[in-house]
Amino acid sequence: MKRIVVCGAGGFIGGHLVSRLKKDGHWVRGVDIKFNEFKKTDADEFLIADLRDPVKVDVTIDETIDEVYQLAADMGGSTYINTGEHDSDVMHNSCIINLNVLKTCSMKNVTKIFYSSSACVYPEYNQLDPDNPKCSEDTTYPAEPDSEYGWEKLFSERLYKAFERNHGLNVRIARFHNIYGPLGTFDGGREKAPAAICRKIIEAKIKKNKNIEIWGDGTQTRSFLYIDDCIQGTLDVFNSNSNEVFNVGSEEQVSINQMIEIIEDVANYKVNKNYQLDKPKGVRGRSSDNSFIQKQIGWKHTHTLKEGLIKTYNWISNQIESGTNISKFSKSSIEN
Ligand code: GKE
């Protein structure tokens, strides 16, 4: 059993990671600036703390901690990171958290640290053709991410590797490719496409309305990874002997229009797509290339997009129909 801190435990992926680490028999301290909006934490301890404050990080990662998973970031879907309006917050907040966490880990006896990077580090010039994006790890440089969010993620990757070289920290890094699933936010502006489009179709069906808004022309492509595969991939990277940076994503590339068709099928409800060409779109094409991670550590995703969307659609539908009051899941926290 290890004593583990999960930074960002109030978030979507962080919350699922806490539950899995608890299931695996570890002691887990969760920390975040907010509670998980949909589920009571499974952590042994949950701290409400702002990790931009080095004093809070020092209290959170104390001498008894063996391992740290750093997933705390100021982030969201296209709306949040591709408009440019949040660039300074995204870069400042996420970077200062990484600086604080690394400094504290290098001063304490933390044996291993995981950092969640992103597919957004990849250069835009390799993501211009929706049918043929190139996102293998060896195409990262010359760097030209399409967003400041991507630049911060790439800078922070280099920061972790510098602490690995200069302070002997045992670092593991995965680049997540658009993770979706139950407990992920589906409204409010930070949601990503799978949850957003599920919500739009659910709401259209409830209101017996046929029209939904789609950002861009729907031909842009992505691959989307179901949360359970993301958690397994994270642990496989963390527990591997390799300190390479790996993609953790799906290779099932779809256009947004194709994803809409899958969700219409799940909903048994057809909609008319009202394309909003002026809305934030990100890159034209992106899909995870898993050849390196499969060769090096053997990880593969197991859920098809349809399987994941069925679970996600049903969960969001239940949330909307039950009108879940977010605050009812806040567990008593240890304020510090
Ligand atoms: N969020 C959202 N909501 N996207 C929509 C919508 C909608 O209602 N309708 C169409 N889209 C389109 C977006 O314009 C974009 O082209 C595509 O779906 C995917 O948008 P996304 O899921 O919000 O985010 P991206 O894949 O562009 O980028 C995300 O990538 C992740 C890593 O793969 C980032 O926003 C980060 O959340 C993350 O790093």
Image: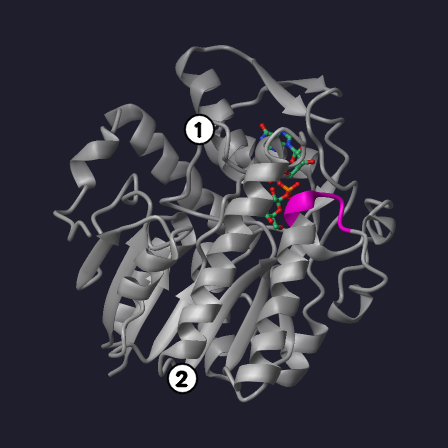
Position of 38 with respect to 45 (left or right) is right
Residue 34 position, x and y percent, is 30, 43
Is residue 63 visible in the rendered image? The answer is yes
- Residue identifier under label 1: 187
Q: Nearer the viewer, residue 208 or 125?
A: 125
Magenta span: predominant SS is: loop
Taking the spot 55% from the left edge, 38% from the top edge, the residue there is 89
Which of labels 1 and 2 is toward the front? 2
Q: Nearer the viewer, residue 153 or 305?
A: 153
Residue 33 position, x and y percent, is 33, 45
Stretch of the chain drawn in magenta: 145-149
Image quadrant, ligand 1? top right
Please give the label number shown on residue 176. none
- Residue identifier under label 2: 111
Q: Are marks 1 and 2 in contact (CB under 8 Å)?
A: no
Residue 192 higher or lower than 248, as above or below: above
Asked if disc 1 is less than 8 Å from ligand 1, the answer is no
Q: Secondary structure at mark 1?
A: loop
Q: Which numbered disc, 1 or 2, marks the residue that appears first in the sequence?
A: 2
